[in-house]
Image: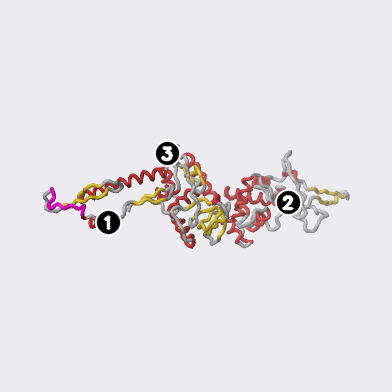
Amino acid sequence: MISVRAVNTCSIFRSSPPVSSFRFRFNKHLRTNTSSLHYDRYSKSGSGFPTFRFDLPILGHGDVRSYSLQSFVDTVFEELTSNRKRKRQGICSAIKLKTGGEVLDDKPVNQAVEKGLLVEFKKDSERVLLAVVQRRDGKKNWMVYDQNGVTSSIKPQQITYIVPGVDNFDQTQISSFIQKAQQNLDTSLLEFAWIELLEKNKSVTPEELAEMIFGNVEPLESYCAHLLLSKDDLYFTVQETKGSRSLYGPRPTVQVEELMRRKLAKEAAEKELQEFVQLLKSAKAMPSNAKPPKTSWVVEEKIQCKIESLEAYAIDACKSNDEKRIAGMILTAMGMGKTASSALNLLIDIGYFPVHVNLDMLKLNIHTDHPDEIISAAEDLLSEPINRKDLTHLKVYAIDVDEADELDDALSATRLQDGRIKVWIHVADPTQYVQPGSKGLLFSCPLLLIPCFQRNLRWRE
């Protein structure tokens, strides 16, 4: 059987019935029209076989002609072939492909909504559902039964697609229809269709695409083609829409390449984000005494960038919208709210911040750890000889708490040979380690002691 469908109107043209059916009607015609049957005892070819001749009206014509059995069959097949060609031409006219950059009367024709149709409609800004039309609701709206088993009233403007070739669809089969459609989706087919349509400079409807990639325009295949086109943001773009009908055109090659580059970059960023989220979850699940050190989060640049975005978000110090966006994406992926407190708690949970972190110090950008260059400079100072007089043998007195291990000032005394007492005033002198003209900062915090110098310099003997 040869079947061809006019995709714009979704009507179906079929060829002649099977040969067996044709033969039955042909024999019946012979039996009921014996008066017009002529019998020649011998054929002109001299084969000895009888030749039957009969008069029959030609298909599609009003005249009557006389044929032999073989010539009649040949004529019938010629008529069928001619009919098929005419139907194909009619279908091409119905499809009205857009060629050469001009529309040959190829305007999307909106299909009227009727009871029993299977329609796709926009439930809200994020959801699109399939439903069966039940009945009218007022003058313009329609009551539909959707895939979730919910009956609701929708406006005609909400309908995004009417599945062709469907009458009185069984609403209990919606879920099965959707499942089959999802299993039939193959986005790689779009690329092949895009290449062919771009070469021919043609636009395409969902039904035409279904014919191209699936070989037919049955309801399921047509809906699959609609899903591929409506969800595609790479190869095709909507050229025209009228109601639930849309016409799609292939994007230029340069545009597709740029969109592909962006898509690959987005996929790589999403993969990188998921890997970082797994790292956070792993650190969060560790016991407090086994958390990774703070320095481990700044070894790799891509990890350091994300952890610093979280830190800036926690203290309301994001320097750019991109930094804020990255932190928000991380918190969302972790199932946390996009707030400064959420970011702070996450950094504490992974061991990046201490439990009793001082946010004011973070906001003022006051570092409690000495940077690497300071540590290196201190090591160099320790290797230099001491050019000061050693007074460590003196007994020094200071007014301070018992826990003090660094004395800013103190007194000591020694008796001279003539009986006089020499009083020594000891004052801490950090300038011996500071180059002239350089600047420093002294920070006083009632809850935390932050030494100006490293411990090895403070306790240098």
Please indicate, yes or no, whether residue 290 appears anywhere in the rendered image. Answer: yes
Q: Position of residue 258 (x, y in %)?
A: 50, 41
N-term-proximal mark, 3 vs 1: 1
Question: Could you say which disc has been placed on residue 246 in the image?
Answer: none
Q: Dot 1 surroundings within 10 Å: few (below 14), some, or many (20 or more)?
A: few
Q: Looking at the picture, which amino acid does disc 3 mark? A: Thr
Q: Position of residue 421 (x, y in %)?
A: 87, 50
- How far separated are the C-alphas under marks 2 and 3? 68 Å
Which is in the foreground here, disc 2 or disc 1? 1
The residue segment tinted magenta is 35-44
Q: Looking at the picture, which amino acid does disc 1 mark? A: Arg
**Residue 345 falls inside the magenta stretch:** no
Is 413 left, or right, of 376 in this rendering? right
Q: Dot 2 surroundings within 10 Å: few (below 14), some, or many (20 or more)?
A: few
Q: Looking at the picture, which amino acid does disc 2 mark? A: Asp
Is 292 left, or right, of 185 in this rendering? right
SS assignment at label 2 = helix
- How far separated are the C-alphas under marks 3 and 1? 44 Å
Question: Could you say which disc has been placed on residue 25 in the image?
Answer: 1
N-term-proximal mark, 2 vs 1: 1
Badge 2 vs badge 1, beta-carbon distance below 8 Å? no
Q: Dot 3 surroundings within 10 Å: few (below 14), some, or many (20 or more)?
A: some
SS assignment at label 3 = loop
Report how many numbered discs are placed on residues in the image: 3
Q: Position of residue 102 (x, y in %)?
A: 45, 37
Residue denoted by label 2: 360
- The answer to which of 63 and 379 lies nearer the viewer is 63
Is 317 left, or right, of 333 in this rendering? right
Badge 2 vs badge 3, beta-carbon distance below 8 Å? no
